Amino acid sequence: MTAELKKLQEIVDQAKNIVFFGGAGVSTESGIPDFRSVDGLYSQSYKYPPETILSHEFFMDNTEEFYRFYRNKMLCPDARPNKAHIKLAELEAAGKLKAVITQNIDGLHQMAGSKNVLELHGSVLRNYCMKCHQFYDVETIAEGEEVPKCSCGGTIKPDVVLYGEGLDSDVMNQSVSAIAKADVLIIGGTSLAVYPAAGLINYYRGNHLVLINKSSTPMDDVANLAIDGKIGEVLGAIKL
Ligand code: NAD
Protein backbone atom coordinates (compact mmCIF):
# COMPACT_ATOMS: atom_id res chain seq x y z
CA MET A 1 0.00 0.00 0.00
CA THR A 2 1.40 3.42 -0.90
CA ALA A 3 1.83 6.09 1.78
CA GLU A 4 -1.08 8.04 0.24
CA LEU A 5 -3.45 5.08 0.41
CA LYS A 6 -2.37 4.39 3.98
CA LYS A 7 -3.12 8.00 4.92
CA LEU A 8 -6.54 7.78 3.20
CA GLN A 9 -7.31 4.57 5.10
CA GLU A 10 -6.41 6.27 8.42
CA ILE A 11 -8.64 9.24 7.62
CA VAL A 12 -11.57 6.95 6.72
CA ASP A 13 -11.02 4.79 9.82
CA GLN A 14 -11.36 7.84 12.07
CA ALA A 15 -14.19 9.52 10.16
CA LYS A 16 -17.77 9.69 11.39
CA ASN A 17 -19.33 11.91 8.75
CA ILE A 18 -17.79 11.58 5.29
CA VAL A 19 -19.27 13.49 2.37
CA PHE A 20 -18.22 12.71 -1.18
CA PHE A 21 -18.34 15.37 -3.91
CA GLY A 22 -17.77 14.05 -7.42
CA GLY A 23 -18.01 14.61 -11.12
CA ALA A 24 -17.77 12.95 -14.49
CA GLY A 25 -14.41 11.32 -13.66
CA VAL A 26 -16.22 8.99 -11.24
CA SER A 27 -17.96 7.33 -14.18
CA THR A 28 -15.14 7.14 -16.75
CA GLU A 29 -14.15 3.69 -15.40
CA SER A 30 -17.75 2.67 -16.19
CA GLY A 31 -17.17 3.68 -19.82
CA ILE A 32 -18.91 7.09 -19.76
CA PRO A 33 -16.62 9.81 -21.15
CA ASP A 34 -16.08 12.97 -19.11
CA PHE A 35 -15.78 16.44 -20.64
CA ARG A 36 -12.21 17.57 -20.05
CA SER A 37 -9.96 14.46 -20.15
CA VAL A 38 -7.85 13.85 -23.27
CA ASP A 39 -10.45 11.37 -24.52
CA GLY A 40 -13.34 13.40 -23.08
CA LEU A 41 -16.16 14.95 -25.05
CA TYR A 42 -14.30 18.25 -25.55
CA SER A 43 -11.56 16.48 -27.48
CA GLN A 44 -13.94 15.11 -30.10
CA SER A 45 -14.81 17.27 -33.04
CA TYR A 46 -18.43 18.27 -33.33
CA LYS A 47 -20.01 21.17 -35.07
CA TYR A 48 -20.52 22.72 -31.59
CA PRO A 49 -18.71 22.29 -28.23
CA PRO A 50 -20.65 20.22 -25.64
CA GLU A 51 -21.31 23.31 -23.50
CA THR A 52 -23.13 24.87 -26.45
CA ILE A 53 -25.16 21.77 -27.33
CA LEU A 54 -26.03 21.12 -23.69
CA SER A 55 -27.37 24.63 -23.15
CA HIS A 56 -30.95 25.75 -22.61
CA GLU A 57 -30.82 28.04 -25.60
CA PHE A 58 -29.57 25.28 -27.91
CA PHE A 59 -32.21 22.84 -26.62
CA MET A 60 -34.97 25.36 -27.38
CA ASP A 61 -33.63 26.40 -30.81
CA ASN A 62 -32.13 23.14 -32.13
CA THR A 63 -34.04 20.41 -30.30
CA GLU A 64 -33.42 17.80 -33.00
CA GLU A 65 -29.67 18.34 -33.04
CA PHE A 66 -29.62 18.38 -29.22
CA TYR A 67 -31.27 14.97 -29.11
CA ARG A 68 -28.87 13.54 -31.71
CA PHE A 69 -25.90 14.41 -29.48
CA TYR A 70 -27.71 13.58 -26.24
CA ARG A 71 -28.82 10.10 -27.32
CA ASN A 72 -25.41 9.33 -28.75
CA LYS A 73 -23.18 10.71 -25.99
CA MET A 74 -25.12 11.26 -22.77
CA LEU A 75 -27.24 8.10 -22.66
CA CYS A 76 -25.17 5.05 -21.75
CA PRO A 77 -27.72 2.31 -21.04
CA ASP A 78 -25.08 -0.42 -20.69
CA ALA A 79 -22.93 1.42 -18.13
CA ARG A 80 -22.67 -0.23 -14.72
CA PRO A 81 -21.28 1.08 -11.40
CA ASN A 82 -17.51 0.73 -10.94
CA LYS A 83 -15.43 0.21 -7.80
CA ALA A 84 -15.77 3.88 -6.82
CA HIS A 85 -19.59 3.85 -6.86
CA ILE A 86 -19.65 0.52 -5.03
CA LYS A 87 -17.23 1.54 -2.25
CA LEU A 88 -19.12 4.79 -1.63
CA ALA A 89 -22.37 2.81 -1.26
CA GLU A 90 -20.62 0.44 1.17
CA LEU A 91 -19.25 3.34 3.22
CA GLU A 92 -22.79 4.72 3.51
CA ALA A 93 -24.21 1.32 4.52
CA ALA A 94 -21.47 1.11 7.18
CA GLY A 95 -22.69 4.43 8.62
CA LYS A 96 -19.51 6.36 7.78
CA LEU A 97 -20.61 8.29 4.73
CA LYS A 98 -23.62 10.60 4.97
CA ALA A 99 -24.04 11.95 1.44
CA VAL A 100 -22.84 11.68 -2.14
CA ILE A 101 -23.07 15.01 -3.94
CA THR A 102 -22.67 14.48 -7.66
CA GLN A 103 -22.52 16.58 -10.79
CA ASN A 104 -23.23 13.40 -12.77
CA ILE A 105 -26.54 12.67 -14.39
CA ASP A 106 -26.08 8.94 -15.02
CA GLY A 107 -27.77 7.43 -11.93
CA LEU A 108 -24.84 5.05 -11.28
CA HIS A 109 -24.51 5.92 -7.57
CA GLN A 110 -28.09 4.79 -6.94
CA MET A 111 -27.55 1.70 -9.10
CA ALA A 112 -24.60 0.84 -6.80
CA GLY A 113 -26.87 1.15 -3.75
CA SER A 114 -26.20 4.68 -2.46
CA LYS A 115 -29.29 6.16 -0.78
CA ASN A 116 -28.52 9.79 -0.03
CA VAL A 117 -27.47 11.05 -3.47
CA LEU A 118 -27.76 14.76 -4.16
CA GLU A 119 -27.85 15.19 -7.92
CA LEU A 120 -26.82 18.78 -8.59
CA HIS A 121 -27.37 18.50 -12.33
CA GLY A 122 -30.41 16.19 -12.39
CA SER A 123 -30.69 12.77 -14.00
CA VAL A 124 -31.12 11.31 -17.47
CA LEU A 125 -33.47 8.77 -15.85
CA ARG A 126 -36.17 11.42 -15.37
CA ASN A 127 -37.87 13.23 -18.25
CA TYR A 128 -40.91 15.50 -18.36
CA CYS A 129 -43.29 16.96 -20.91
CA MET A 130 -42.69 20.71 -21.00
CA LYS A 131 -46.42 21.30 -21.49
CA CYS A 132 -48.30 18.94 -19.14
CA HIS A 133 -45.37 17.67 -16.96
CA GLN A 134 -46.14 14.00 -17.64
CA PHE A 135 -43.17 11.81 -16.53
CA TYR A 136 -41.28 9.65 -19.05
CA ASP A 137 -38.53 7.11 -18.35
CA VAL A 138 -35.18 7.02 -20.13
CA GLU A 139 -36.22 4.16 -22.43
CA THR A 140 -38.86 6.41 -24.00
CA ILE A 141 -36.19 9.01 -24.71
CA ALA A 142 -33.59 6.53 -25.98
CA GLU A 143 -35.80 4.99 -28.64
CA GLY A 144 -36.39 6.62 -32.02
CA GLU A 145 -34.54 9.38 -33.79
CA GLU A 146 -37.14 12.12 -33.58
CA VAL A 147 -37.63 14.74 -30.89
CA PRO A 148 -39.57 12.84 -28.18
CA LYS A 149 -43.14 14.08 -27.89
CA CYS A 150 -45.73 13.64 -25.15
CA SER A 151 -49.22 12.28 -25.92
CA CYS A 152 -50.44 15.88 -25.38
CA GLY A 153 -48.15 17.09 -28.19
CA GLY A 154 -45.61 18.82 -25.90
CA THR A 155 -41.86 18.29 -26.20
CA ILE A 156 -40.27 16.01 -23.61
CA LYS A 157 -37.21 17.45 -21.85
CA PRO A 158 -34.68 15.52 -19.76
CA ASP A 159 -34.61 16.54 -16.08
CA VAL A 160 -30.98 17.61 -16.38
CA VAL A 161 -29.67 21.08 -15.68
CA LEU A 162 -28.52 22.52 -18.99
CA TYR A 163 -26.00 25.35 -19.20
CA GLY A 164 -27.95 28.56 -18.68
CA GLU A 165 -30.44 26.92 -16.29
CA GLY A 166 -30.52 27.29 -12.51
CA LEU A 167 -29.81 24.50 -10.02
CA ASP A 168 -32.58 23.14 -7.80
CA SER A 169 -32.48 25.19 -4.59
CA ASP A 170 -33.51 22.25 -2.34
CA VAL A 171 -30.67 20.11 -3.67
CA MET A 172 -28.23 23.02 -3.25
CA ASN A 173 -29.37 23.68 0.34
CA GLN A 174 -29.11 20.00 1.28
CA SER A 175 -25.63 19.89 -0.27
CA VAL A 176 -24.47 22.97 1.66
CA SER A 177 -25.81 21.48 4.88
CA ALA A 178 -24.15 18.07 4.29
CA ILE A 179 -20.77 19.64 3.45
CA ALA A 180 -20.90 22.05 6.41
CA LYS A 181 -21.45 19.10 8.81
CA ALA A 182 -18.84 16.76 7.28
CA ASP A 183 -15.67 15.79 9.19
CA VAL A 184 -14.10 14.47 5.97
CA LEU A 185 -14.75 15.77 2.46
CA ILE A 186 -13.56 13.57 -0.40
CA ILE A 187 -13.58 15.30 -3.77
CA GLY A 188 -13.01 13.10 -6.81
CA GLY A 189 -13.23 12.90 -10.57
CA THR A 190 -14.02 16.54 -11.14
CA SER A 191 -12.10 19.38 -12.75
CA LEU A 192 -13.92 21.78 -10.37
CA ALA A 193 -14.50 24.01 -13.38
CA VAL A 194 -18.32 24.04 -13.42
CA TYR A 195 -20.04 26.60 -11.19
CA PRO A 196 -22.06 26.98 -9.00
CA ALA A 197 -21.51 23.27 -8.17
CA ALA A 198 -17.75 23.64 -7.58
CA GLY A 199 -18.36 26.58 -5.20
CA LEU A 200 -20.11 24.25 -2.75
CA ILE A 201 -16.84 22.96 -1.36
CA ASN A 202 -16.18 26.39 0.17
CA TYR A 203 -18.74 25.45 2.83
CA TYR A 204 -16.48 22.70 4.19
CA ARG A 205 -15.23 23.35 7.73
CA GLY A 206 -13.65 19.97 8.61
CA ASN A 207 -10.01 18.96 8.97
CA HIS A 208 -9.53 16.45 6.18
CA LEU A 209 -10.00 17.54 2.60
CA VAL A 210 -9.10 14.66 0.29
CA LEU A 211 -8.74 15.07 -3.45
CA ILE A 212 -8.61 12.11 -5.85
CA ASN A 213 -8.16 13.10 -9.49
CA LYS A 214 -6.21 12.12 -12.57
CA SER A 215 -5.22 15.71 -13.35
CA SER A 216 -4.61 18.89 -11.37
CA THR A 217 -7.48 21.01 -10.04
CA PRO A 218 -7.72 24.49 -8.47
CA MET A 219 -7.98 22.81 -5.03
CA ASP A 220 -4.72 20.81 -5.18
CA ASP A 221 -2.86 23.23 -2.89
CA VAL A 222 -5.68 23.43 -0.37
CA ALA A 223 -6.22 19.68 0.03
CA ASN A 224 -4.72 17.86 3.02
CA LEU A 225 -4.28 14.78 0.86
CA ALA A 226 -4.19 14.92 -2.95
CA ILE A 227 -4.01 11.57 -4.74
CA ASP A 228 -3.22 11.50 -8.43
CA GLY A 229 -4.90 8.28 -9.54
CA LYS A 230 -7.93 6.49 -10.86
CA ILE A 231 -10.77 6.94 -8.44
CA GLY A 232 -12.10 3.38 -8.80
CA GLU A 233 -8.71 1.97 -7.87
CA VAL A 234 -8.13 4.43 -5.03
CA LEU A 235 -11.54 4.14 -3.36
CA GLY A 236 -11.66 0.44 -4.18
CA ALA A 237 -8.56 -0.07 -2.01
CA ILE A 238 -10.27 1.27 1.14
CA LYS A 239 -11.03 -1.45 3.69
CA LEU A 240 -14.14 -1.24 5.82
P1 NAD B 1 -14.84 17.27 -16.18
O1 NAD B 1 -14.82 16.49 -17.43
O2 NAD B 1 -14.69 18.73 -16.26
O3 NAD B 1 -13.67 16.74 -15.24
C1 NAD B 1 -13.47 15.39 -14.98
C2 NAD B 1 -12.21 15.26 -14.13
O4 NAD B 1 -12.11 13.90 -13.72
C3 NAD B 1 -10.93 15.61 -14.90
O5 NAD B 1 -10.16 16.45 -14.06
C4 NAD B 1 -10.26 14.25 -15.11
O6 NAD B 1 -8.85 14.33 -15.07
C5 NAD B 1 -10.77 13.45 -13.94
N1 NAD B 1 -10.90 12.02 -14.18
C6 NAD B 1 -11.36 11.36 -15.29
N2 NAD B 1 -11.39 10.05 -15.09
C7 NAD B 1 -10.93 9.84 -13.82
C8 NAD B 1 -10.72 8.69 -13.01
N3 NAD B 1 -10.97 7.47 -13.46
N4 NAD B 1 -10.24 8.86 -11.76
C9 NAD B 1 -9.94 10.10 -11.28
N5 NAD B 1 -10.12 11.22 -12.00
C10 NAD B 1 -10.62 11.10 -13.23
O7 NAD B 1 -16.13 16.85 -15.38
P2 NAD B 1 -16.94 17.60 -14.21
O8 NAD B 1 -15.97 18.32 -13.33
O9 NAD B 1 -17.86 16.63 -13.63
O10 NAD B 1 -17.79 18.72 -14.98
C11 NAD B 1 -18.39 18.45 -16.20
C12 NAD B 1 -19.92 18.53 -16.24
O11 NAD B 1 -20.28 17.52 -17.17
C13 NAD B 1 -20.66 18.20 -15.01
O12 NAD B 1 -21.54 19.24 -14.81
C14 NAD B 1 -21.46 16.91 -15.31
O13 NAD B 1 -22.82 17.12 -15.02
C15 NAD B 1 -21.36 16.72 -16.79
N6 NAD B 1 -21.08 15.32 -17.24
C16 NAD B 1 -21.64 14.26 -16.61
C17 NAD B 1 -21.35 12.97 -17.03
C18 NAD B 1 -21.98 11.79 -16.29
O14 NAD B 1 -23.08 11.93 -15.77
N7 NAD B 1 -21.30 10.66 -16.20
C19 NAD B 1 -20.47 12.76 -18.09
C20 NAD B 1 -19.92 13.88 -18.75
C21 NAD B 1 -20.24 15.17 -18.30
Image: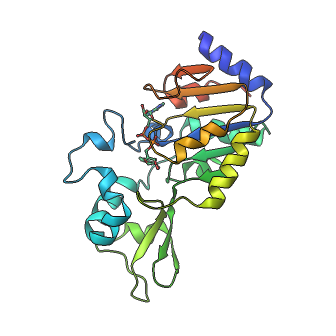
Is residue 219 left or right of 115 when viewed as pictured?
left
Residue at 36%, 60% (x, y): give it.
55
Quadrant in the rendering for residue 215: top left
The N terminus, quarter of image: top right
Residue 70, image x, y percentages: 34, 59
Q: Quadrant of ligand 1?
A: top left
**Left or right: where 11 falls relative to 140:** right
Furthest residue in direction bottom, as rendered: 152
Which quadrant would residue 42 be assigned to in this image? top left
Q: How is the image coloured?
A: rainbow
Question: What residue is at 43 percent from the left and 71 percent from the top?
Answer: 157
**46 w.r.t. 93: above or below:** below
* Res 180 seen here: yes
Q: Is residue 86 above or below residue 232?
A: below
Above or below, 125 against 211 in this view is below
Q: Is residue 92 above or below residue 219?
A: below
Image location of residue 27, percent across then percent down = 48, 41
Q: Position of residue 218 (x, y in %)?
A: 48, 29
Along the line of sight, the residue nearer the viewer: 188 or 144: 188
Judge whether residue 85 can be spotted in this image. no
User: In the depicted view, which residue is nearer to us: 110 or 46?
Assistant: 46
Which quarter of the rendering shows the C terminus? Answer: top right
